[in-house]
Amino acid sequence: MKKLLLFALVALSLSACTTKTTNGTQSADADRQPSVITWIEDKPGPTVQGRNVFPSVPDSLWSALGLTEGVPSSISCFLLETEGCKILLDAGLGAPFSQLIPKLEESGVTPDSLSLIYITHMHPDHIGGMLHEGSVVFPNAEVYVNRVEAEAWQSMDGERAALPKAVLNAYSDHLHLFEAGDMLPGGVLSIAAYGHTPGHTVFQKDSILVIADLMHGAALQMSHPEYCPFFDMDPAAATEARIRIMDYARSNSLSVYGMHLPTGSVTLSDAQ
Ligand SMILES: [Zn+2]
């Protein structure tokens, strides 16, 4: 009886998660439950980005900012619960120390039960957790990747493209390529923030903005968005995206979550 009731509840919550991708703006539904986002620190902290990650920053600026040891950071993913959907935003490193799976289970989500994954971009600290020894970790998940990002990695050669290609191939039966600006299931808006990678994408749900890898050292880049880490693939585009998206967040008083922000949200209306 208890089992039946549980099944009915699961079915109810699944049916509430609309799986349609549309092009447009977020709907305003006053009756819906507030969204909940859970910060999952995949690599146990504390994490500091060394000064060598930002090679063009002068010593004088590091000193002025009091960042002589580097910039506080993290390697994180997020679980977004909204409109009956449980959505994993990126999958972390998949390293032996990774905390993604136990943290998901703390939130009542098992690898088998997860139904939606949205990928911000295809660097290894974001998709490493999609595979374990070459096999899919989330066999029942529908995986959403920006078409520009997927096609860019598919067309690249060499070792750096091996993992993205393996992930795209392993999840090919559950793969959904979206266009920037599309509204994904759960009413999550995808926004182009190209530069860090060719199709780097940030996601917005109401006042929640997940900025992916727009910033690797917030204590530096919040006031100096012109400085790029060496892994921004197109530094000029990454800088433009950083300035544009952070202006958007500020002017809309959004709460910002990032895969390399130190754990805790930042409301940019309160920031400099
Ligand atoms: Zn990253």
Image: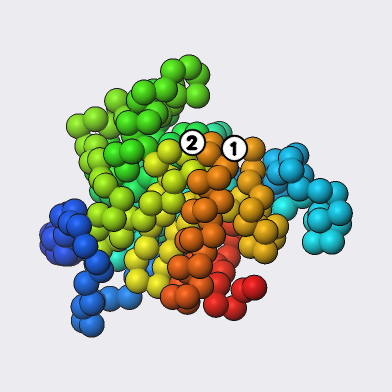
The location of residue 220, given as percent across then percent down, is 70, 57
**Front in this rendered view, residue 204 or 109:** 204
Secondary structure beneath dot 2 equals loop
Q: Is residue 244 above or below residue 120?
A: below
Q: Quadrant of the C terminus?
A: bottom right
State the residue at coordinates (49%, 53%). Answer: 241
Q: Are circles 1 and 2 on residues that touch, CB within 8 Å?
A: yes
| Residue 52 falls left or right of residue 2 | right
Residue labelled with disc 1:
231
Q: Quadrant of the N terminus?
A: bottom left
Residue labelled with disc 2:
123
Rendering quarter of residue 155: top left
State the residue at coordinates (64%, 38%). Answer: 230
**Front in this rendered view, residue 107 or 33:** 33
The location of residue 157, given as percent across then percent down, is 44, 18
Whether label 2 lies within 8 Å of ligand 1 gets the answer yes
Query: Which residue ends up furthest to the bottom in the rendered image?
Result: 30
| Residue 230 falls left or right of residue 26 | right
Q: Which mark is residue 66?
A: none
Whether label 1 lies within 8 Å of ligand 1 gets the answer yes
The location of residue 6, given as percent across then percent down, is 19, 61
Q: Which of marks 1 and 2 is in front?
A: 1
**Front in this rendered view, residue 101 or 198:** 198
Rendering quarter of residue 32: bottom left
* Residue 114 visible at all: no
Q: In this view, does 202 lie above or below 37?
A: above
| Residue 113 falls left or right of residue 74 | left
Gap in angstroms between the C-alphas marked 1 and 2: 10 Å
**Kind of residue sitting beneath label 2:** His
Secondary structure beneath dot 1 equals loop
